[in-house]
Image: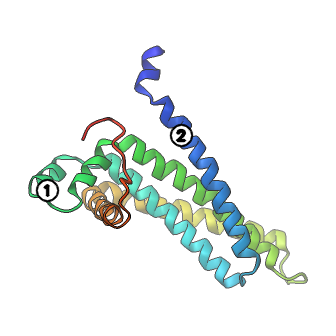
Amino acid sequence: MNGLWKKYNLRWVIVISIWTFILTIIFSFLSEIFLSSTAIIIAFLLLLIIIFIGVISDMLGIAVAAADAKPFHAMAADKVEGSKIAIKLVRNASVVSSFCNDVIGDICGIISGVVGTSIILQLPDGLLISKSMITVVLAGFVASLTVGGKAVGKNIAIRQSQKIVFKAARFLNFLHINIGVDIIPDVNGKK
């Protein structure tokens, strides 16, 4: 049992739990403020964007777990931009995958529920269909888009893991250059 705790980074679990709590509060608060004065069609578009972010995040988490670092080491030897970050992503696959799949994915799921509820509450009374029926249909719509999107995304992520990781690494490298922050710290202590 003691060896299990050494292998499993308890500090990471605590940090990720705190970040999930903070990010969920922030995004829920912002979506509540934004949605209170937004037209239903805009709220629906926001709902689709949130689902899309969850699907893309899930794809990245799967791709990082499925990718092989060897091609990125070859790119790094040729000084290809973003290759070092790709190596960090793959080297820290469990942390990156957990963050993408669990934190971002779960937050998107929670926020999509908030947005869906906001859409229902904005509907006028006296519709031909009851709000409870619309709630059931909207919940089914959100669930089917999320699950279906993630199923397709996982298939793509496994087949195209190298490309997905490299595109994400190039994007993170762009942010690193422009913000000046190491977005993906190397939690394993390797450089």
Q: Which residue is mark 1?
A: 75
Which quadrant holds the C terminus? top left
Compare residues 84 and 141 and report the one nearer the observer. 84
Q: Give the image quarter of residue 80.
A: bottom left
The relative height of residue 183 versus residue 118 in the rendered view (above or below) is above
Q: Which residue is mark 2?
A: 15
Q: Is residue 58 left or right of residue 74?
A: right
In the orientation shown, which residue stands out farthest toward the right?
A: 126
Three-letter amino acid code of the residue under disc 1: Met
Q: Count up the numbered dots.
A: 2
Where residue 186 appears, as percent x and y from the top left, is: 33, 42
The structure residue drawn at horizontal position 64% and vertical position 48%, both measured from the top left corner, is 21
Labels 2 and 1: the sequence-earlier one? 2
The relative height of residue 70 versus residue 139 in the rendered view (above or below) is above
The relative height of residue 113 versus residue 6 in the rendered view (above or below) is below
Three-letter amino acid code of the residue under disc 2: Val
Where residue 101 appears, as percent x and y from the top left, is: 48, 51
